[in-house]
Image: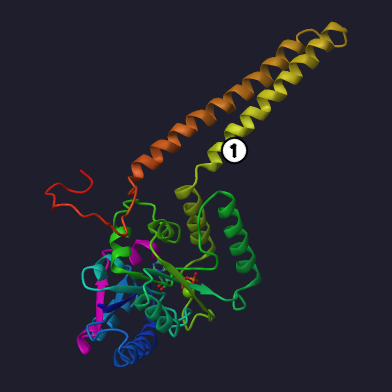
Amino acid sequence: MRNTLYIVVPCYNEEAVLPETARRLSEKLEQLISGGSVSGESRILFVDDGSRDRTWELIEGLAAGDSRFGGVKLSRNRGHQNALLAGLMTARAHCDMAVSMDADLQDDINAIDQMTADYLAGSDIVYGVRSSRRTDTFFKRTTAQGYYRFMKLLGVELVYNHADFRLMSRRALDALAEFREVNLFLRGVVPLVGYRCSFVEYERGERFAGESKYPLKKMLAFAFDGITSFSVKPIRLITLLGMLIFAASILMLLYSLAAKAFHFTVQGWTSLICSIWMLGGIQLLSLGIIGEYVGKIYFETKARPRYAIEQLLLKAPPSDRRPDA
Ligand code: UDP
Ligand code: MG
């Protein structure tokens, strides 16, 4: 089995940790190469996501000094997910498997041993899963857990306690490349790729140095992106609400007609109250129905691949037509 490994590391203003990250990763890579589990062609690929500090100069220095290091510089800051994708898509042309991880050494690089072992045993995707959230603040822990539950409720498949520390085989990367969506939420897309997967537990540490590049505002935007990129359930809720209010309006209609019949209303109240309830209900219901179509259009514009074939058993003379034609 071919076994060239690329370790892809997105970096945004990471000058404080980069030298240490590079040192530890190259040690790890040497160890994997001499152990024979990955080939000598393996590389560590840093992606500079439009940093404003000396990150790119450091990457240039590393690449000049040692051919095991490579760098990709994005034209400007495009965010973690896009930087990661840029790195993975660059690696795809050269590697048999790619591990993605953060620059801050929060992910335990020793888990890469098990990841490559799982790959060699036939897994296409190996998810790094945090065994506990002890190093997180109470706030981050509870919001994160609530988020996973909420996403599950909305029918989005996420791997619990998995960030973007994972190994993907080349064919999984090829399948990922077929996803053309612009609002990228890799944690939701990768499970859609399919193929054989496995999980490696690791203990997540503190950031080695520097500050989190995910302030609350970015985190909320990221979480919201995850919901709206994968689920039309919020639209369904509007439809449901419309139905409920419409049903309630019929009860109100009966009640106000009865009230009028027994003369304990003022002039004009019955018609007003009926219109308010009925129109409100009908409007919400219509919004929900329009929303259903908007949701359909939304998913159509994503143009997601409808399938990826894992194996084909077919004895037939070679065809010159494309399999999907
Ligand atoms: N990152 C990036 N672009 C951004 C923000 C972050 O490439 O716009 C990188 C960052 O350098 C790090 C990884 O994404 O390698 C995760 O960021 P961070 O560790 O700050 O997030 P946290 O662990 O605090 O959630
Ligand atoms: Mg981090």
Q: Name the one closer to the observer, 270 or 92.
A: 92
Left or right side of 93 for 238:
right
The secondary element bearing badge 1 is classed as helix
Report the residue that reaches farthest toward the front. Answer: 315
Q: Residue at x 36, y 40 (%)?
A: 300
| Amino acid type at mark 1 | Leu
- The colouring scheme, among rainbow, by chain, secondary structure or one colour, is rainbow
Quarter placement of the N terminus:
bottom left
Left or right side of 172 for 150:
right
The residue tagged 1 is: 237
Q: Please state the extent of the stretch shown in magenta in the rendering.
A: 63-86
Q: Name the one closer to the observer, 18 or 230.
A: 230
Quarter placement of the C terminus:
top left
- Position of residue 196 measured from the top left corner of the image (x, y, whole percent): 40, 65
Left or right side of 77 for 208:
right
- Res 304 seen here: yes
